Amino acid sequence: MRPRFLIKNGTIVDGTGAPTYKGDIRVRDGLIAEIGPDLVPETRERVVDATGCYVAPGFLEVHNHFDGPMWWMPTMEPMSGYGVTTSINGNCGFAAAPVHDDPVVRKELIDIFSFFEDIPNKPFVDELPWDWRTWSEYKASLQRHVKLPVNFAAFVGHIPIRLAVMGMDAWDRAATPTEIKRMCDQLEDALKAGALGMSSNLLDHDSRNRPIPSMLADDAEWSALIDVIAQYPGSTLEVIVDHFMRMTGQASAERIARLAQGKTIRIQIAGGIPTLEFQSPFIPAAEASHEKRKAAGLDIWMAYHHLSPTIVINFTASLTFAQSNNYIWNEIVAASSEDQKYAMLSDSDWLARARASWDKTIRQSPLSKPDEIELLDTETGAGPTGITLAEYMRQEKINHPSDALAEWVLANGVGSALRLKDWPNDEAALLKLFRDPKSVGNIADSGAHGKMFCGIGDNVLLLTKYVRDLKQLSIEEGVHILTGKAADHFSLHDRGVIDAGRRADLVVFNLTEIERRKDEKIWDVPDGEGGRTYRYTRAPAPMRLTLVNGVATFDRGAFTGNFPGQYIGPVPKQLAKAVE
């Protein structure tokens, strides 16, 4: 028997952006059964007193990478403690399906995903059954094997589609017409099975500075894939563009918009309008192009995050060196053994190459500024920690930051870590995006980068910083960004709004109680050798209550151990309400 709840005396923020109001909410059979004033408790109904609290739709994490980690982190904590009820995965062109018959190509799929998203490779290989070839078979395997604390929705990735069809040639060339047809078949398989759409990537280069496979797609390939997506109303094309390294974001966005002309398709461009101070010279042109596309009636949304990522660098699984154009230091990360790493750090020829590589670091990266690199965590205890690399250089009288870092790592161990100073936001650009009707926020990258911590909890920072503390957004606007607006973008029309007949994904919270808690290190990730390695996480916000499909996942200050999440996909508006 499903639990029944009556949430009384709360202030309801319904997720639409409409004004708050006082009221009670009855939850029955996984649905919002009734909303009204002074509802009377019924038999076997648990009454939750929400006095002094907001009652909102459950929050959506709109850009996650739990495709692998969900298999070895089934609680997906601390999601429930931050009111998250739906997780969107398969982003950035990276996904776990489809896969090629050749095990070498399947390994390539894993290696690409693991490298770019800082997800441990060995558990990715060992913990997943890999009993699928198509995306529909992947979804069926998930449903057989993985119970969920949240609702799970996912894109199919452009990169695995290319690898599944072209094998290793996906790295080197455009597809033939026959291969494009097979890609379209793979995409259609996914969309029929309930994928949100297709994600792609026009940003990343690998550790050898090779453009990733999706960047080899020509206009013929793109047009054919867009045509398939357009045949499935409610589906979305997500494209990641580059306003960080090579500054091709504007050209990429314009290319995708040109190819979408005349097509009925929703497109999400992640990073299409940059939001960091160092990107400010590129913001006006990006904003102007976005306004022109809206005026032309194109259904193109800008995706953004409300803070820059916290970047913690380690020397075993970090892509930061490679993405900062520092490929020689990335050799330390890529080395397969500790002995190899220490040998390089002690070798005069490698040290000379490393100095030259360091000097080519892109100027916007904190790696180019020793006074913005904190010596964070020591494996051996030798230290020092808590000071910057620049301070360490002065203390030890070392002239070059690369030499200083090599000396510090030799003393402290390759299991040590650095923290880079956060980039400041362009707050004016952010405020525009908050209120833009064609924007989707909170692309937090949760599930990836566990050792540099792009993490769950950023959603709450939107409410505490911009609503509560700075008062730049109303509670209605903040909740709308995290719920109804995001659900509408992904065509998840049966949730995201408090309305009778919708799914009972709900959260109860007191705005004065919640915080994005300090990150903490925990050792719960299998290392593939029978042991555990670490990731960063944080304590719950906490919510007073989180319900997923009418079942409590966070209650009385803790995760409940319930797994009521469902595998979901686009829901047409006419089917939004399960009951009337």
Image (cartoon, helix red, strand yellow):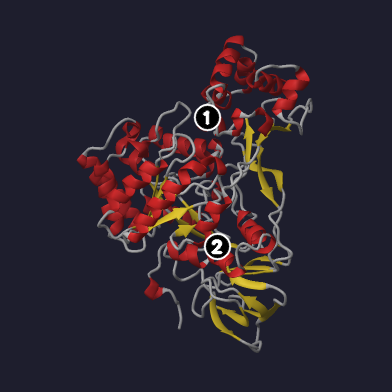
What is the three-letter code of the residue carrying label 1? Ile
Query: What is the secondary structure assignment of the residue under circle 1?
Result: loop
Write down the quadrant of residue 315 in the picture: top right
Q: Is residue 216 above or below residue 94?
A: above
Q: Nearer the viewer, residue 33 or 312?
A: 312
Q: Residue furthest left?
A: 177
Report whether residue 482 is seen: yes
Badge number at residue 482 = 2
| Three-letter amino acid code of the residue under disc 2 | Leu
Residue at 69% across, 23% down:
409
* Rendered location of residue 335, percent (x, y): 56, 23
Q: Position of residue 240 (x, y in %)?
A: 43, 45
The quarter in which the C terminus is drawn is: bottom left
Estimate the spatial distance between the alpha carbons at disc 1 and disc 2, rounded to whole Å: 33 Å
Q: Position of residue 311 (x, y in %)?
A: 62, 39
Q: Residues within 10 Å of mark 1 (few under 14, many from 20)?
A: some
Q: Which residue is mark 1?
A: 362
Q: Is residue 158 visible?
A: no
